Image (spheres, grey):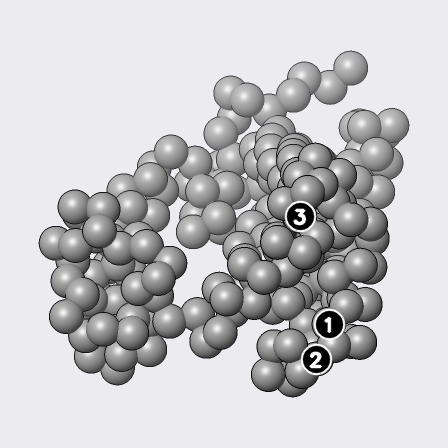
Amino acid sequence: MAFALIRYKWKSIPIIAAVLVLGVVSVFYIPSIKEKMFYDDSVTIEDLQEGKINEDNINTNYRAYMWEQMEKLFYDRHKMTGSGTGTSQGYMYEYPEDFGGLKILHSDFEQQKCDNGDIALYLYGAMILLIFIDCFRTYWRVPYPPIRLCALVAGASLIGVYATFYSDNVVNYSMATLSMPFGFYGMMLGMRSKWRDNPDDPEYQEETDDSLLEEEIMPESN
């Protein structure tokens, strides 16, 4: 969906909305998915519309209880700053029996809250948003295809990675996944810097498919 938003801009909104609707409908009307999602099969889409579904209805495979207990220990008394980097992970390594042998929180959001508080969530979220906006703007303002490709991959993959922060530890245990968007973003920044220094260089004058780039918003060369 992030790919479509960068590539097609506001034209992609109906497609994104349709995908979201289909995703919600599949949760309630495909038995195998519904069984994994909820404790009680009697939950319906009408309950969602009426706001009756909460985390107590959703099968988080023990995660919700673990997150609640960890927040009581390391977040509730220090909501803005948390209890210190590494505190939650250290506790889980030292006392795995508290959570059935689990040694990781299975949520980067929860780990950020417990370790570094709300300020960590705000700063990291702001960083993700600003990088995505920069990728979006670069894709539509730079005519050089390799730069645009890096912007597209970086922006789209970054949103996907960030979404998985809710239910997994991407930062600690999947560095290859986390590094991919930042790797492409770094390549985009490097090539864009060279392009800005030498916009008239023949290397950057490759033909660009007009269907991929709106001519009117391309920057003027100084």
Q: Position of residue 122 (x, y in %)?
A: 65, 35
* Percent coordinates x, y for residue 203 in the rendering: 79, 42
Give the structural element (helix, strand or loop) at label 2: helix
- Of 111 and 17, which appears nearest the observer? 111
SS at circle 1: helix
Camera-nearest residue between 222 and 108: 108
Task: State if disc 1 and disc 2 touch (CB < 8 Å).
Answer: yes
Q: Residue at x 34, y 48 (%)?
A: 16
Please tell me which of labels 2 and 3 falls first in the chain: 3
Amino acid type at mark 1: Met
Query: Label 1 to label 3, Cα distance in Å?
Result: 15 Å
**Which residue: 52% across, 26% down?**
215
Q: Whole-percent x and y of residue 23?
A: 29, 61
Q: Where, by quadrant of the figure, is residue 87 drawn? A: bottom right
Q: Amino acid at mark 3?
A: Tyr
Is 3 on the left-hand or right-hand side of 218? Answer: left
Name the residue beneath numbered marker 2. 96
Distance from the alpha carbon under mark 2 to that under mark 3: 19 Å
Q: Quadrant of residue 207?
A: top right
User: Rounded to the nearest whole Å, what is the CA distance between mark 2 and mark 1?
Assistant: 5 Å
Rendered image: mark on residue 92: 1
The residue located at (29%, 71%) in the rendering is 38
Q: Under tag 3, what secondary structure?
A: loop
Residue sitting at x 16%, y 46%: 50
- Answer whether residue 62 is visible to the viewer in this image: yes
Q: Is residue 193 above or below residue 62?
A: above
**Residue 26, percent from left and from top:** 23, 67
Looking at numbered disc 2 in the image, what kind of residue is underneath it?
Answer: Pro
- Dot 3 corresponds to which residue? 75
Q: Residues within 10 Å of mark 3 (few under 14, many from 20)?
A: many
The answer to whether mark 2 and mark 3 are in CB contact below 8 A is no
